[in-house]
Amino acid sequence: MRVLFWYCDHFNWTPAMKTLEDAPEAGAAQNDRCVVAFVHIEPSDAESGSSTETKLVKNAKWLARKWDVKKIILHSFTHLGEDKAQPQQARELLQRAHTRLADAGYKVMQTPYGYFLDLDLQAPGHPLARVYKQF
């Protein structure tokens, strides 16, 4: 798994192009003061018992605490590596991470899965506004 975490003052999206036929209809969203995880899930990450899901959750919580925010957005981003998990496996892993973060008291959202999105983000010029991790 590879994750590019962003702290964003603003992170907004509008669905631009549907890439998976079975993706449900999706709309635009606007968010302020949030941690956004651009997540690239590889085949080995989706295996049962993989520690990468736990590392994703722990790192997202760590960055949210650093910025004193309670909103975390998970964004499937298959452009950080060559090997990609199957869409259903990736969705399931993101949903498990979503549930774990919500159970820990965070307001969690996911960008629409199966779409290319028009993104509008504003992030401060601070070393902890952009954190890359590879698990």
Image (cartoon, helix red, strand yellow):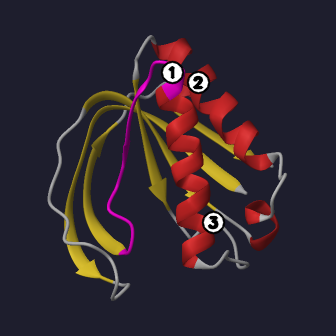
Rounded to the nearest angstrom, the CA distance separating label 2 from label 1 is 5 Å
- Report x, y in % for residue 88: 56, 74
Residue hosting label 3: 80
Rounded to the nearest angstrom, the CA distance separating label 1 from label 3 is 22 Å
Which secondary structure lies at badge 1? Answer: helix
Observer able to see residue 11:
yes
- Give neighbour class at mark 3: few <14, some 14-19, many 20+ (Cα, 10 Å): some
Residue 64 badge: 1
- Report x, y in % for residue 25: 19, 71
Image height check: is 67 above or below 97?
above
Residue 111 lies in the magenta-colored region: yes
Residue 2 lies in the magenta-colored region: no
Which secondary structure lies at badge 3? Answer: loop
- Foreground mark, 1 or 3? 1
Q: Which residues are magenta?
A: 103-114
User: Residue sitting at 82 percent across and 67 percent down?
Assistant: 44
